[in-house]
Image (tube, rainbow, N blue to C red):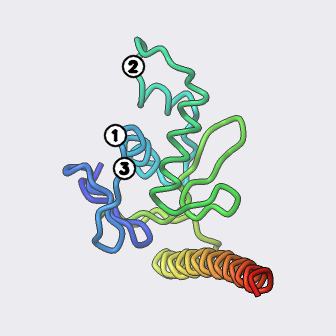
Amino acid sequence: MADLIRFGTFELDIRSGQLRNKGRIVRVAPQPFKLLTLLTAAPGKLVSREEIRTALWDGETFIDFEQSVNFTVKQVREALNDNADRAIYVETVPKRGYRFIAPVDDGRPPVIHAHAGTDGTMAKLLWTNVAELRMQEEQRKARRRIITIASAVAASLAAVGALIYWIVR
């Protein structure tokens, strides 16, 4: 496995234990980092829940593995700004495991599951554009929610102010 894995706007530096997005460090706890390393080592392939359990916890660890795997996957998705319903990076295969679906560049020739007749490099560029568009869409939605909430708060404050003015008058 390579020491530096690139996907989308991210770099996973195995040697330093860092995840970077556009050069900025993204904080990731050790278990989610291990999981991300495991998933990116086999892009496009199913990694079973059992493989994840074995890789992340030794046999002497006594925890609820189902909950722990779910929580660790959630942390990976949060670090990547990914969404289970509209996955860009980590796809859930119900009852079986997870699959890293983004094209990965680890310095070796790319292994991209592209449609027949599509050049691997072109598929990677297209995927990157789609991923960036989805992230921008999510950011716009978040801004709209903030603006809506701020408008509602401002309207409420204006109504309270008008009520107080009316009562005091």
Is residue 28 depicted above or below 88 in this figure? Answer: above
Tell me which amino acid carries mark 1: Pro
**Residue visible at 61% across and 28% down in the picture:** 66
**Residue visible at 59% across and 38% down in the picture:** 70
- Seen from the viewer's position, the closer of residues 51 and 123 is 51
Tell me which amino acid carries mark 3: Val
Residue 83: quarter of image: bottom right
Residue with the mark numbered 3: 28
**Residue visible at 65% across and 48% down in the picture:** 92
**Residue visible at 42% across and 43% down in the picture:** 32
Q: Calculate the distance from the C-alpha at mark 2 to the C-alpha at mark 3.
A: 20 Å
| Residue count near mark 2 (Cα–Cα under 10 Å), binned few <14, some 14–19, many ≥20 | few
Residue 154 at x, y percent in the picture: 67, 82
Q: Calculate the distance from the C-alpha at mark 3 to the C-alpha at mark 1.
A: 7 Å
Residue 10 at x, y percent in the picture: 38, 67
Residue with the mark numbered 1: 30
- Seen from the viewer's position, the closer of residues 149 and 57 is 149
Do the numbered discs 3 and 1 sit on residues whose CB atoms are within 8 Å?
no
The quadrant of the image that shows the C terminus is bottom right
Residue 159 at x, y percent in the picture: 76, 82
Is residue 54 depicted above or below 26 in this figure? Answer: above
Residue with the mark numbered 2: 58
Is residue 120 depicted above or below 1 in this figure? Answer: below
Query: Of all residues shown, which one is farthest toward the front?
Result: 169
Say whether residue 25 is left or right of residue 127: left
Say whether residue 3 is left or right of residue 148: left
